[in-house]
Image: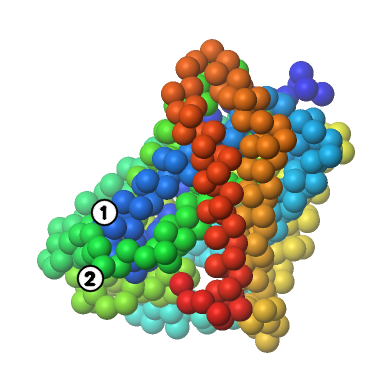
């Protein structure tokens, strides 16, 4: 079985595929909002410091686990220590929960790309009203969800080298170019500079514990950590590639695109709607932005480029989610890739239907006060991911010992940040993760406002 395992052809393929997973909706619809909310420059600075310490440590750990064992999450933990295979099981559940609802959102993005190409009149005029009308229909969002999930399945079906790697190598460079072009364009809008100042100028008075926790939570999600993705991708990595420098490059991509997304969105919103409170999530992407595009010269064209960019970002992320689930099914059940792809596709389709209907026909169904999609989002990101990350740190730090993974990183390179890695893994990361977990639970219970 292990000998047949496919792999990325080299470092560039690996880095682009992992960066493709990391760069997603979170970079585009959440990072700019958080940065604007938490005092611009000071948030960026905090985020960068956390990325090169905390994010770096967790990502190195996952990739090294994958490459050392050559297996996806469940098998990997079992091989390292059979008593701890439950961490792998927990981690494997996360992408299974995320893939269906992430694809529902991917469907919305596909619909918007289509709408902007076909003629975005009402979408731009009515903003969020148009979106609400679209998602409340029973059939149309389901069809777009099916299309998005179908494209994801085809890429995963083609395999690691011919599907995942090839698509990442094409989509990621285009995504970077689109980000630069759109950000460049919005910077020339009259009044944009005020937004740029607001986005970058550090407002030290806004530094707070909430800011750090907000940045940490975002980092986690943005780097696709604690859900077995990086373990799976690590298992496809060749032994002669440097894990340390690959992680630096992935972080550079992920943070770079997040900052560029802010440069596209914050100044444009400032210039065209006079600043005010920037919102996040669907409201920003499907409500505010189309109205901002309407007021731009060539707004339809910019809209097409923008939704193409978002579609690529969402697709490379959903591909990584499905690839992870498929590789778990293949490893665990020893099924062929084709059979595994089919079963995962059907499963995600069935699980995604409630999330899709939750904004329309089933909007009365609330779990913990949230619609179905937001509920799955909360359980996976705010509860399960911190738990998996915490258990991983404790397991590697105290049971397996960091030395085991350091050896994997050091196979044929020097591990420059070895000391930092050990300290963060054993002491700093567990405390920080516990704090993220507590705040997100307190926030949902309405005891804390972040
Ligand atoms: N990292 C992705 C983002 O920033 C989110 C993601 C989550 C991707 C889960 C894959 C899996 O949007």
Drawn side of residue 343 relative to residue 233, left or right: right
* Residue beneath disc 2: 270
Q: Residue furthest bottom?
A: 364
Q: Residue 160's x, y, as percent?
A: 63, 31
Q: How many marks?
A: 2
* Residue beneath disc 1: 183
Identify the residue at horizontal 65%, vertical 71% (top origin).
375
Q: Residue 43's x, y, as percent?
A: 33, 58
Q: Is residue 201 above or below residue 287?
A: above
User: Along the line of sight, which residue is nearer the eye, 335 or 59?
Assistant: 59
Identify the residue at horizontal 71%, vertical 32% (top origin).
400
Identify the residue at horizontal 51%, vertical 77% (top origin).
448
User: Along the line of sight, which residue is nearer the eye, 123 or 325?
Assistant: 325
Q: Residue furthest left?
A: 190
The quarter of the displayed image where residue 39 is located:
bottom left
Q: Residue 345's x, y, as percent?
A: 74, 51
Residue 54 appears in the rendering: yes
Q: Around disc 2, counting alpha carbons within 10 Å, would you say few (fewer than 14), some (14 to 19), or many (20 or more)? A: many
Q: Is residue 428 above or below residue 377?
A: above
**Ligand 1 has an atom within 8 Å of the beta carbon of the residue at disc 1:** no
The quarter of the displayed image where residue 417 is located:
top left
Q: Is residue 243 above or below residue 326?
A: above
Q: Is residue 90 above or below residue 207?
A: above
Q: Residue 270's x, y, as percent?
A: 22, 70
For marks 1 and 2, give the one nearer the viewer: 2
Q: State the SS at label 2.
A: helix
Q: State which tag comes first along the sequence, 1 or 2.
A: 1
Residue 167 appears in the rendering: no
Quadrant of the drawing holding the N terminus:
top right
What's the distance in space between the residues labelled 1 and 2, CA to CA?
13 Å
Identify the residue at horizontal 56%, vertical 63% (top origin).
105
């Amino acid at each position: 079985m292990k000998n047949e395992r496919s792999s990325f052809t080299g470092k560039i393929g690996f880095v682009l595929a992992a960066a493709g997973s990391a760069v997603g909706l979170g970079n585009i619809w959440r990072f700019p909002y958080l940065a604007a909310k938490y005092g611009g420059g000071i948030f960026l600075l905090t985020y960068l410091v956390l990325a090169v310490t905390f994010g770096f440590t967790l990502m190195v750990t996952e990739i090294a686990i994958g490459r050392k064992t050559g297996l996806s999450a469940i098998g990997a933990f079992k091989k390292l220590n059979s008593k701890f295979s439950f961490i792998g099981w927990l981690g494997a559940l996360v992408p299974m929960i995320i893939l269906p609802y992430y694809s529902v959102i991917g469907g919305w993005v596909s619909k918007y790309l289509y709408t902007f190409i076909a003629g975005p009149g009402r979408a731009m005029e009515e903003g969020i009203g148009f979106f609400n009308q679209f998602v409340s229909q029973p059939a149309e969002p389901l069809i777009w969800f099916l299309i998005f999930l179908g494209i994801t399945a085809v890429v995963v079906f083609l395999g690691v080298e011919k599907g995942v790697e090839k698509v990442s190598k094409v989509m990621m460079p285009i995504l970077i170019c689109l980000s630069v072009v759109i950000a460049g364009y919005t910077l020339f809008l009259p009044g944009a500079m005020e937004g740029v100042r607001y986005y970058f100028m550090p407002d030290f008075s806004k530094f707070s514990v909430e800011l750090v926790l907000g940045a940490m939570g975002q980092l986690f999600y943005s780097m696709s950590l604690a859900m077995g993705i990086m373990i799976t991708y690590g298992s496809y990595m060749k032994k002669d590639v440097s894990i340390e420098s690959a992680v630096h490059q992935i972080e550079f991509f992920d943070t770079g695109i997040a900052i560029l997304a802010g440069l596209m969105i914050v100044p444009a919103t400032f210039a065209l709607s006079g600043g005010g409170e920037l919102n996040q999530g669907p409201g920003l992407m499907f409500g505010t932005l189309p109205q901002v595009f309407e007021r731009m010269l060539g707004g339809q064209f910019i809209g097409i480029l923008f939704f193409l960019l978002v579609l690529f970002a969402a697709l490379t992320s959903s591909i990584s989610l499905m690839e992870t689930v498929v590789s778990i099914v293949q490893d665990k059940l020893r099924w062929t890739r084709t059979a595994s792809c089919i079963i995962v596709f059907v499963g995600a389709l069935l699980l995604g239907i409630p999330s899709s209907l939750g904004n329309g026909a089933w909007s009365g169904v609330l779990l913990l006060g949230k619609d179905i999609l937001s509920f799955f989002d909360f359980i996976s990101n705010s509860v399960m991911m911190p738990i998996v990350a915490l258990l991983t740190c404790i397991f590697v730090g105290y049971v397996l010992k960091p030395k085991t993974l350091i050896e994997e990183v050091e196979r044929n390179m020097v591990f420059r940040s070895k000391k930092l890695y050990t300290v963060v893994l054993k002491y700093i990361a567990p405390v920080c993760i516990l704090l993220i977990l507590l705040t997100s639970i307190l926030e949902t219970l309405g005891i804390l406002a972040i």
